[in-house]
Amino acid sequence: MTNDTLANQLAGLSVRLLHRLAKNRVPRHFRMGKNRLIQTLLSLSPEQQADLETHLSSLLQAHPRVPQPPKHGKGDKPKHEPNVVSRPALPPQPSVPAKPAISLQALLEGIGVPPPQSFKPDDWQQEAIDRLTTNDVILSVPTGSGKTYVAIEAMRRAIKADRMVIYTSPLKALSNTKLTEFSQTFGADQVGILTGDRRDNPQAPILIMTTEILRNLLYDAASGEIDMRLDTLGLIILDESQFLADRERGVVWEETIIFCPAQARLLLLSASIGNPDEIAAWISSIRSESCHLIQHRNRSVLLRAAYLDPGGKLAPFFRTRDIARGRGFALHPETKRLFANYEEQTLSPRSKR
Ligand SMILES: Nc1ncnc2c1ncn2[C@@H]1O[C@H](COP(=O)(O)OP(=O)(O)OP(=O)(O)O)[C@@H](O)[C@H]1O
Ligand SMILES: [Mg+2]
């Protein structure tokens, strides 16, 4: 087979079949776009090419090409063979948004508002609430699982016992959202806020603040500088407590835990602590009661990831549609191909090396 014939046959193959041909012949072929892949296959040694041709003819037999619609008017004879090219063509430059590899509707299929049903706490939620009567608790469960329910029930119980609650978040914006949310649940007079920007209702039994403000209050209380109602503090909730691992701010969470008054229970909430068992063991070692870890990875809200190519094509990001356990999965071949094409078109020859 001449090089031109081989080039034509390869150019007529789908990218999927080209990758199949390239497997075990071209290292890191999955990172290549169609044209680079064809050029690399054409530059194989004569022995490898003979082997490639055999593989190619078996692929062509198994996957005969669907005839292309004629490009000329009915009855017109094309002046040139439509698919004969002496060299593989350059990748098409997207002038109009490409047709998506998957429609947004198909990608999100099956995700929606569930039918209404009566509320029943999950077992892990009840377990967390029960444990908090005597122990500190780390709740390490996926996003959207219902950590707030545990926080609210624990707060309700603390207030009923005439105990004060402090709820911290790493962001002022989140603190403001929580103020609205908790005011609706408990009544505006029951909730106050202390952030760098706001100081409202500081005598309320539920106080929302950034973790830095709480750490500073605990510092000052420890040094006797302020008369904080620490002896009536029943519960400290540290939301987004994966910030413990933050290079800059992690120390604030660490010190807050260390200075947390002995009689107050600690509730750490997070969807993404990498080593919650180690954190629980550390908290147990510095506090009077042991820290109980509640952890699961079942997502109640499905997550789907997609890759939006700069050319406008949407493709599933992973082979598996749902990110059920928040772990990495194999990339979808279409996303790999789109990304390789993009890389090939945009990276300078120097950075490709
Ligand atoms: N046991 C349950 N059954 C059904 N729905 C629940 C249950 N518990 C909580 N929910 C609902 O799940 C949704 C998400 O809950 P929530 O906001 O507490 O999640 P979260 O775990 O705090 O997530 P994030 O990590 O994003 O902060 C809310 O609408 C809540 O009402
Ligand atoms: Mg939450």
Image (cartoon, rainbow, N blue to C red):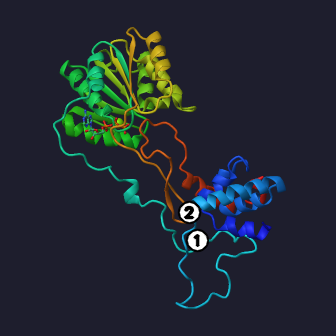
Give the residue type at disc 1: Pro
Residue 94 marker? 1
Q: Quadrant of the N terminus?
A: bottom right
Q: Quadrant of residue 90?
A: bottom right
Q: Quadrant of residue 104?
A: bottom left
Res 336 seen here:
yes
Ligand 1 is found in which quarter of the picture?
A: top left
Give the residue type at disc 2: Pro
Q: Give yes or no for contact between labels 1 and 2 (Cβ–Cβ under 8 Å).
A: yes
Helix, strand or loop under label 1 = loop
x and y percent of residue 17 in the render? 61, 57
x and y percent of residue 106 in the render? 38, 57
- Residue located 55% across and 82% down the image: 70
Residue 310 marker? 2
Spatial separation of the CA atoms under disc 1 and disc 2: 9 Å
Helix, strand or loop under label 2 = loop
Residue toward you, 253 or 145: 145
Q: Nearer the viewer, mark 1 or mark 2?
A: 1
x and y percent of residue 278 in the render? 50, 18
